Image (cartoon, rainbow, N blue to C red):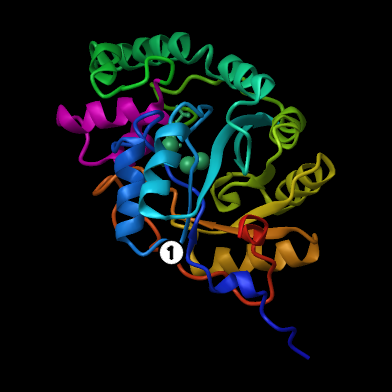
Amino acid sequence: MQALEHPASAVAADLHSHSTVSDGVLTPREVVERAAGHAVELFSLTDHDEISGLAEADATARGLALPFVHGVEVSVTWAATTVHVVGLGIDPDHRPLQQALSRVRNGRTARARQMAEGLAAAGIEDAYEGALRFVRNPELISRTHFARHLVETGVCRDVRDVFRRYLVAGKPGYVPHQWAELTEAVSWIADAGGVAVLAHPGRYRVGDLRLHELVREFKEAGGTAIEVVTSNHSADQMRRFARMAGEMELEASRGSDFHGPGEAENVELGAVPPLPPGLIPVWHRFL
Ligand code: AMP
Ligand code: MN
Ligand code: MN
Ligand code: MN
């Protein structure tokens, strides 16, 4: 017998997005205004390793009567793989979280300089300075900013092309980096009153066994949900992670991972499929 759908399923939630405070192109205010304009009913701004955009986003959301969830996306290194953990419902004034995120951000500048050296060795000069022109938060220079620079200067056709040719493991602009530990990231989020969501699991280039291991460790660490629906999941991946959420007794999240208009083809705020049936939407906690 099919269980009744959880009532929260009907709410158009978008619980993953970025602003200029990390590697998005719109300000926190603009992102929230755009979400409201795209019929989002429950929204979260989840900048990488940074929560300084939440006050502006929250104030904008209040003005628009758009229910808002304080969020963050923490960079984690798990078994030499970069994994992202979204924290939802965190208290942005929680000092230990602020300090922990500051430590995670620390090191991005040195990493970016090394990336530029790698690119210079491949014949691309002054990429650091070029990337900086796209950076709005000096503590948060990311690969995305390099990608925008290489597109603007005509080295690559689009951001996807830059990553493929220059910014992933084995390519000249890639520099391995040690981010937070999985267990500590989940604890920071929980201690700040939030719930941890394993972001876009379909993106991790690890085999089935490793992925199960990751999800198991995530849950053991206190993780609450898997991001089942996100713009870079195929229909197959959504089905697969829906099944995994059910089997592992984890709740499910939904988010566009929007970075800006035209930034990735067809990615728009709120414009991702509904959750597959039979799951517990993590956002029942925020309604
Ligand atoms: P960083 O935190 O500096 O390692 O940058 C990670 C960001 O790069 C992600 O949050 C995405 O926004 C972007 N990114 C990673 N891989 C890709 C890809 N293959 N295509 C486009 N953007 C990507
Ligand atoms: Mn990003
Ligand atoms: Mn991510
Ligand atoms: Mn993201």
The crowd level at tag 1 (other Cα within 10 Å; few <14, some 14-19, many 20+) is many
Report whether 161 appears left or right of 106.
Answer: left
Residue at image x 15%, y 27%?
153
Foreground residue among 260 and 12: 12
Amino acid at the residue labelled 1: Val
- Locate residue 239: give its quadrant: bottom right
In the rendered structure, does residue 145 fall within the stretch colored magenta? Answer: yes
Residue 30: x %, y % from top left: 29, 42
Q: What range of the chain is rendered magenta?
A: 141-167
Rendered-image quadrant of the C terminus = bottom right
- Locate residue 192: give its quadrant: top right
**Residue holding disc 1:** 272
Residue at image x 72%, y 32%?
182
Q: Does residue 67 lie above or below 106 as drawn?
A: below
Residue 60: x %, y % from top left: 37, 43
Q: Does residue 168 lie above or below 277 as drawn?
A: above
Ligand 2 quadrant assignment = top left
- Locate residue 249: give its quadrant: bottom right
Foreground residue among 205 and 226: 226
Foreground residue among 40 and 155: 40
Residue at image x 24%, y 11%?
126
Main secondary structure type of the part rendered in magenta: helix
In the rendered structure, does residue 209 fall within the stretch colored magenta? Answer: no
Residue 257: x %, y % from top left: 44, 48
Q: Does residue 122 lie above or below 248 as drawn?
A: above
Residue at image x 36%, y 64%?
39
Report whether 43 appears left or right of 219.
Answer: left
